[in-house]
Image: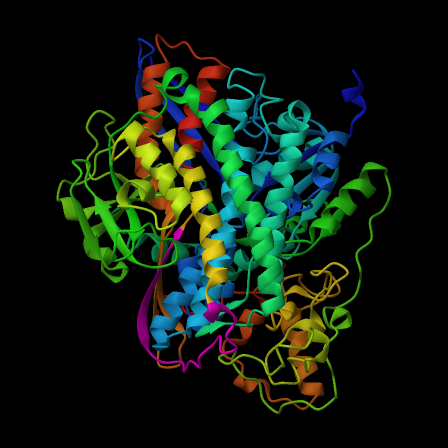
Amino acid sequence: MTQVITIHPVTRIEGNARIHIQLDAAGEVRDAQVRISSLRGFEQFVVGMPAEEIPRIVTRICGICPWMHHLAAVKAVDACFGVQPPPAGHLLRELCQVLAHIHDKILHFFFLGAPDFVIRPDADYSVRNIMGLVQQQPELAARVVRMRQLGQMMLEQLAGKAIHPVAAVTGGFARPLADSLRKSLYHDAQKLLDFAVFALEFAKKKVFSQFLEVFASVGAVTTGFLGTVDVYGNLRLYSGTLRMMHPDGHMKEFEPSAYEQMLAEEAVAWSTAKIVYARSWDEGLSLDPVSPKGVYRVNTLARINVCDQIATPRAQAELEEFRSRFGRPAQHSLLYHWARLIELVYACERVLELLEDERITDQTVRNHATPRAGRGVGHVEAPRGTLIHDYTTDENGCITRANLIVGTTHNIAPMNVSVRQTAASCIQAGKVDDEILNRIEMAVRAYDP
Amino acid sequence: MKDKRRPRLSFVWLHACSGCEIALLNSGERLPELLNKVEIVHFPLLVDHKFGGEQEFALPEADIGFVSGGVASEEHLALLYSMRRTCRILVSLGTCATHGGVPALRNRWTAAATLETVFGDTSGRATVAAEMPALLDRVYSVDEKVRVDFCLPGCPPHPEMIVHVIETLMTDGQPRLPGKSVCETCPTIRTGEMHRTVRRFLNNAEYDSDEPVEEMRCLLEQGFLCMGPVTAGGCGGLSVPLCVQARVPCRGCYGPVRPEGNQLLDMLNVLASHGVDHRAIVDRQSLLRFSGAHGLLRLTRKTK
């Protein structure tokens, strides 16, 4: 006799997912899977469309991170058409991207993740959420809502549409930044930085202290990591080289356009999300939690692990403290939350840095593009991880082939490993309750899928 | 138990991206106020309520239910039927739910062609996603499958409009949409002189960046395809349409001005009546990129 336990739907994540846990006759976990059921077919229906329109289409892959798809797509189309944006075009795109990271990290930490830590995972499910936070800590909740809103308003001022944006265009950006707006954005960005520093201090005192004691069993796995760095090894979100770290710590860098040599995709029966693994390690794919093979992770913890340092002072100080406590690479899944808030500090500092760059108010924001046949790979670091868009165009500049690897796809393998490990360590003799099931979901939530 | 008197709200997403839900969260200071006035019985993004009961998608009873996303799989259909059974008032939230939205672009291909493109040649690999819910033949809007009490289009709908609709329905009122086109809410300068053909958006529009958008010439008159005349307005709230704020032409994300309109035919009519040659439009069918449900986008693409 075997028993199947289902958690459906996985909540406080974006998208449709369920967890399947199979127990053996003795009630021990035999297998567990995160099953994703969403197949929209973007790779099919962009075929035949003019490439310059695609950055306005693929935004609908994700309403939380539309900016990431918008920018990876526009970079891929630039490469297909062989056009380089002027400096202000790149700076404005990056400014939008880091602002979008800010709203995303506040959303994920406070609205989705934090209720497990601030309200406790054993609390009744009906209060373990943002409404519970509003009731229990109204001042904190009000500040969180206000700051997230501020980041979104800044994006609207810069780019019109904040959700499903349109302002990044082939060859650059649609609209220059006026100096008056630059000054007001700078002022607002300082408020965001103050909040980011506060959020990290708050989390260190009230949240992270529980991690390694109370939640040691949640998501303790060992994998490799993938992220983006510049030539000095600094953490980068908008552009740079991909750096893959093997679980043993050795690292290899590669250009985004070489992703097919480094990574392999595999379809499975139980999920519409394909599984991506490290082809270059030559060890195949295994989701066995004791010794996973080919499994690497992306997203905040991965970026914090693969970079040598962060080029902004406050985030760098936080990175040093983090490394002194957890080493490099840090492996525990719940540390994603900690890394997320270090990145929040970096993103706020980076907004200020970008606004200080004199070139950002240049009037020339876009170079003319001529449709042509070509192939282009565009990549950015999305909140959920390395995002790759790969397009091929015909002589009329219309799409003939598209391949997309989104952040969450890289993390499907490690999420499954983490869920299996967490389920196996929390479920004994077939005994489950709401708290145990929520701990298993926490292993998914850490990845912010 | 004063909680019992709070209106019960239920949210599900089907073939969706979560943009509508994020738009609701973007209602800012009004959000905590709203959350305090209602009881949310199901909302996977925010609340840990699970499906339960005898049927797979059993949901609690609610006064008002919101469905985002179109209907693309057997699973979506089962969940939608469950929503209809349990909600007194059912709202289609966002253009995917009201008109199919971007994911209905798949209606130009068969489901089998889409699967083959996404998963590669699956012949002999019958196990690929085999345990997942079957795709429907095409992507449907919510009203094609169940009775809908109110349709709120937008990709995403404006946050204040979402809050307005929730608050009005909570008091048993009838919410109102602006009923205007994007053009009617756009302040750019129109002279009546049109460019003779339609250009691809490969250069920025002509405008003085030191001047407000009110000083910019209409983008359609500048020769760019702008779907403003045939698209429902409201994206900017009381302000300028959002894409126009970015100096970028509208692509129609609120769907047709009249719910049963056809954005492709309506736009070709607008161009013809102004003597503009529409043959320069590359991939005309994609003018239905937000409203391809209701059988408007059909199998017109050759399968490989």
Number of numbered discs visible in the structure rendering: 0
- Identify which residue is drawn at 74% across, 41% down: B30
Coordinates of residue A201 in the picture (x, y in percent): 49, 31
Residue B119: x and y in percent read 33, 52
Seen from the viewer's position, the closer of residues B80 and A171 is: A171
Region of the chain picked out in magenta, as a range: A358-381
Left or right: where A122 falls relative to A234: right
Residue A270's place in the image compared with A69, above or below, is above
The answer, for residue B300, to whether it is visible in the render is no
Q: Is residue B116 above or below residue A172?
A: above
User: Is A370 one of the magenta-colored residues?
Assistant: yes
Q: Quadrant of residue A321?
A: top left
Where, quadrant-wise, is the C terminus of chain A in this rendering?
A: top left
The answer to whether residue B53 is magenta is no
Residue that appears at 75% across and 88% down: B191
Give the image location of residue B237, x and y in percent: 74, 58
User: Where is the N terminus of chain A found, in terms of image quarters?
Assistant: top left
Above/below status of B74 relative to B199: above
Which residue is situated farthest in the left direction here? A282
Q: Which image quadrant is residue A340 in? A: top left
Q: Position of residue A78 (x, y in %)?
A: 38, 72
- Left or right of B25 on screen, residue A77: left
Which of the two residues, B100 or B77, is positioned nearer the viewer here?
B100
In this rendering, the answer to whether A200 lies above or below A166 is above
